[in-house]
Image: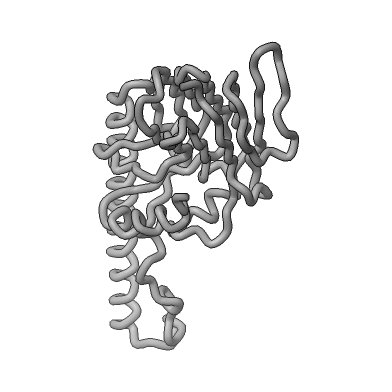
Amino acid sequence: MMHWTRFALALAAPLMLLGCVLSPTKFVSTLRIDADRGFAFTYVGEVLAVDPSEGIGKSDTEGTEETPPETKPEAEVDGAAFEAIAFQAEDNTAKAEAEAKLRAIAEALSKEAGYRKVEYIGNKTFRIDYAIEGRLTHNFLYPFNTDAQVIVPFIAIELRANDTVRVTAPAFANQTQSPIPGADSSASKLDGTFTLSTNAEIVSQNSEDGAKTEGARKTISWRATPLSKTAPLAVLKLAK
């Protein structure tokens, strides 16, 4: 069984150097898996961009002053003021570069099949409307985009050798001690629902409410909040 915490940790190092991680916040997501391997997935809502490099290498005493400015010689005070202005200009430049990068990520995502709408709305937040369908002839991850440097999935569908399929949604829970810096704080904004619909046999699932039968199909729903500690998980048996 793939351990998603270990998987995310293995990806964390290159992400810290290259890009950002998208974290779900307010959303509605659905997944349909049919016994004949047809599937459809949607994600409609907002995601937050987390920069794994933020906060790395900063000293606990950074930004503190050894002595109040008024006790220093005038020349030192002038030097400190000039340094503060330089730091502010550098900070403004960094913020502008970060905003440009986030808009570039939105553009890169919009070129991928399935994205009906991708909009960067500011404050490190994207508004997304994503829908895709097809047949499960191989594993499926969302999101996964090398141009946007987004490779830590919200959801993973894994085909198994015994005609079963395992669905996991590691990002739809506030799992503690995330290996990605900043991910813990973004998980505090979780507010969504994830619903799986299927006519396949349900081997196992971990929703507290269990599966509900609607005609020939069954649905399983999970609520994602900051208090959700266990990621959605289901195993289905497909037709041969």
The relative height of residue 91 versus residue 164 in the rendered view (above or below) is below
Q: Residue at x 28, y 52 (%)?
A: 93
The relative height of residue 219 versus residue 222 in the rendered view (above or below) is above
Q: Residue furthest top?
A: 215
Q: Position of residue 66 (x, y in %)?
A: 42, 86
| Protein image colouring | one colour
Q: Position of residue 169 (x, y in %)?
A: 52, 40
Q: Residue at x 66, y 13 (%)?
A: 216
Q: Residue at x 65, y 24 (%)?
A: 219
Looking at the rendering, which quadrant does residue 64 occupy?
bottom left
Judge from the rendering whether residue 186 lies leftward or rightward of residue 147; answer left or right. right
Looking at the rendering, which quadrant does residue 152 occupy?
top left
Q: Residue furthest right?
A: 209
The relative height of residue 114 versus residue 147 in the rendered view (above or below) is above
Which residue is nearer to you in this view: 146 or 62? 146
Which residue is nearer to you in this view: 215 or 64? 215
Q: Residue at x 43, y 37 (%)?
A: 160
Which residue is nearer to you in this view: 147 or 164? 164
- Looking at the rendered structure, the number of numbered marks drawn on it comes to 0
Which residue is nearer to you in this view: 203 or 114? 203
Q: Position of residue 80 (x, y in %)?
A: 33, 75
